[in-house]
Image (spheres, rainbow, N blue to C red):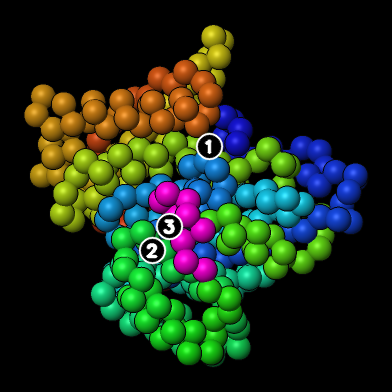
Amino acid sequence: MSSEPGADDSGDAAGDAGASERRCGFVAVIGAPNVGKSTLVNRLVGSKVSIVSPKVQTTRARVLGIALIADAQILLVDTPGLFAPRRRLDKAMVAAAWEGAAGADAITVIVDAAREGAATDAAPVIDWLRDKQRRAILVLNKVDAADKPRILALTAALHDQGVFDPVFAISALNGDGVADLAAHLAQTLPPGPWLYPEDQLSDMPARMLAAEITREKLFWQLQQELPYSIAVETENWADRDDGSVRIDQVIWVEREAQRPIVLGKGGKRIKQIGEQARKELENLLGHRIHLFLYVKIREKWREDPAFYRLHGLQHPG
C-alpha cells in the first residue's frame, strides 16, 4: 500500500511471466453485522485494510482487500453488514453490500457460529442467493467460542437450504481453519492475469485509510449511539522533506453537545484517539506521522450527497 493518496497504477500490474498460470477474481464477503467479515479480510490479506470494532455496522462502504495465495490474487470485497435499514445511510450501506455480492466471481457468506439465531440472520442472504440462482461458500466463524453440537446443528440447518457448498468452520480472530478456506478460494477463481501489483494490499486511497483508522479509534473510545453520528475526513496530506507525513483530519459531529464528548475533559480523549491512530498509521505506512485532529459541527452530514460520493456509496435520493 502506497503512502501517497491514491493507488499507484503505473506499470503492468500482472507482469508477463507466468500470467497464463495465474488466477484472479473477486470474492464477496457478506453476512449480518458483526460476524467477523472485516477480521477475516484482514487475516487473509495479512494486514489491516478494513477497520474493526465490537459495535455493529462499523464498515460503511465496500472495502477491497488483496490477498495473494499461491498463484492466485484474491480480490476480497468486504461489505457492510446486512440488516434492516432505517435511515438513508443505512439504506446506502445495505445497497453497497448487495452490489458487492452481485458482481463477484465467488460469494462467501459469514455466519457467527456462537450467536443465537445465526440461521435466522442468514435468511436474507439465502433468499437473495435463490433469487439470483447463485451458490455461496458458507463460512462458520467464531467456532472457538461455540460448542461442537451447536456448530454441527447450524451446519446441517444451513447446508439443507441448498445454496451453500462447501462449508468451512474457522476462527478469523486466531486463524484456525483460515488456510483451508484461502486455498479453496484460490482454486475457485478463474484463470487470468492479476489486476493489481503484487505488493498492493487494497485499492483504498491512503487518505481514506487514514480517516478510517481514526474512525475505528473513535468507535472503540465512544459509547452508545455517538459513533454513528461521527464522520472523519482527511483534509490535508503533506509529505515532509524528512520523510514524515503531516495529516490533518476533521471529525464531524452533528450537534454542539457531541463536541465535548469527543474532546473529553481537558482534551484528554481526543489526545488518546490521536495517539492510537498515529501509532497504527506509522505501523501501516512505514513513515513517521504527524496527526492533527479537529472536531467540527456539520448538522445532518448523513444527508450530504458529498459524503456518499467520498465513500463510494449511492445516495438514496
Left or right for 17, reference 64: right
Indicate the position of residue 169 as horizontal and vertical percent values.
Answer: 47, 66
Indicate the position of residue 131 as horizontal and vertical percent values.
Answer: 54, 90
Is 204 included in the stretch rendered in magenta?
no
Q: Secondary structure at mark 3?
A: loop
- Give the residue pinned by disc 3: 171
Q: State the residue lying farthest toward the front.
A: 148
Answer above or below: position of 107 versus 10: below
Cβ–Cβ under 8 Å for marks 2 and 3: yes
Q: Secondary structure at mark 1?
A: helix
Q: Residues within 10 Å of mark 3 (few under 14, many from 20)?
A: many
Q: Which mark is residue 143?
A: 2
Left or right for 161, reference 116: right
Q: Secondary structure at mark 2?
A: helix
Q: Specify start and end residues of the magenta stretch as a single range.
A: 168-177
Q: Residues within 10 Å of mark 2 (few under 14, many from 20)?
A: some
